[in-house]
Image (tube, helix red, strand yellow):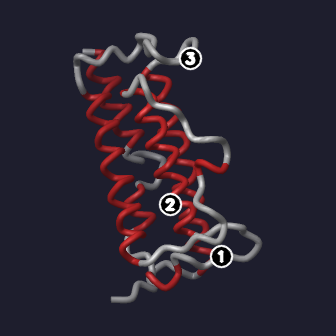
Amino acid sequence: MEDQILRRQLVNLLQGRGAHMPFDDAVADFPPDMINTRPPNVTYTPWHLVEHLRLAQWDILEYVRNPRHESPPWPEGYWPAPDAQADAAAWNASLDAFRRDLRDMQAIVEDPATDLFALIPHGYDGHTILREALILADHNAYHVGELAILRQVMGAWGKAQH
């Protein structure tokens, strides 16, 4: 019973429920003409931030499930190039990949066969799936909140173009 409660709480945390904004709320109806805009005093764009979220989440997911995974170099492997831009297709591909990887991590956490407390056999000392799920939820919550603030600063709430 406690196991099911823990898994449910972890999934809620991964989904951004409770005290955090869900990813889909932060990106809903994002104005396409603003995905490559740098807000004042910020060195990256909303798309860069979404890509950072995607890349970091992908890395954590692959670390958990793939013994052969090698993480990208820090920090450049976790962000697009500073001058990189996205069109609508690239923006949507980033969103779709983020959602897919989040679903995959949630499935790992929800699977009763997953021992959340066991050491990851190919992982670093002390790393468990529970630890990785918590790090992922924490990282996502931080940057999804940041994306919401960037939208506010940019005046990008309620400005969707159809």
Local secondary structure at mark 1: loop
Residue 80, by quadrant, is: bottom right
Q: Residue at x 45, y 86 (%)?
A: 159
Cα gap from disc 1 to disc 3, whole angstroms:
37 Å
In the rendered structure, find residue 124 and report the number of the disc placed on it: 3
Local secondary structure at mark 2: helix
Quarter of the image where the C terminus is located: bottom left
In the drawing, does residue 3 fall left or right of residue 37? left
Image vertical order of residue 132 relative to residue 144, above or below: above
- Foreground mark, 1 or 3, reads 3
Q: Residue at x 36, y 27 (%)?
A: 65
Q: How many marks?
A: 3
Q: Which residue is mark 1?
A: 38
Q: Earlier in the sequence, mark 2 or mark 1?
A: 1
Cα gap from disc 2 to disc 3, whole angstroms:
27 Å
Q: Residue at x 46, y 16 (%)?
A: 122
Where in the figure is residue 53, as x and y percent of width and height?
51, 52
Image vertical order of residue 57 relative to residue 34, above or below: above
Q: Residue at x 57, y 41 (%)?
A: 72
Image vertical order of residue 123 relative to residue 7, above or below: above
In the drawing, does residue 11 fall left or right of residue 53? left
**Amino acid beneath label 1:** Arg
In the drawing, does residue 56 fall left or right of residue 118? right
Q: Earlier in the sequence, mark 1 or mark 3?
A: 1
Where in the figure is residue 103, as x and y percent of width and height?
29, 43
Where in the figure is residue 131, as x and y percent of width and height?
50, 24
Where in the figure is residue 41, as x and y percent of width and height?
77, 72
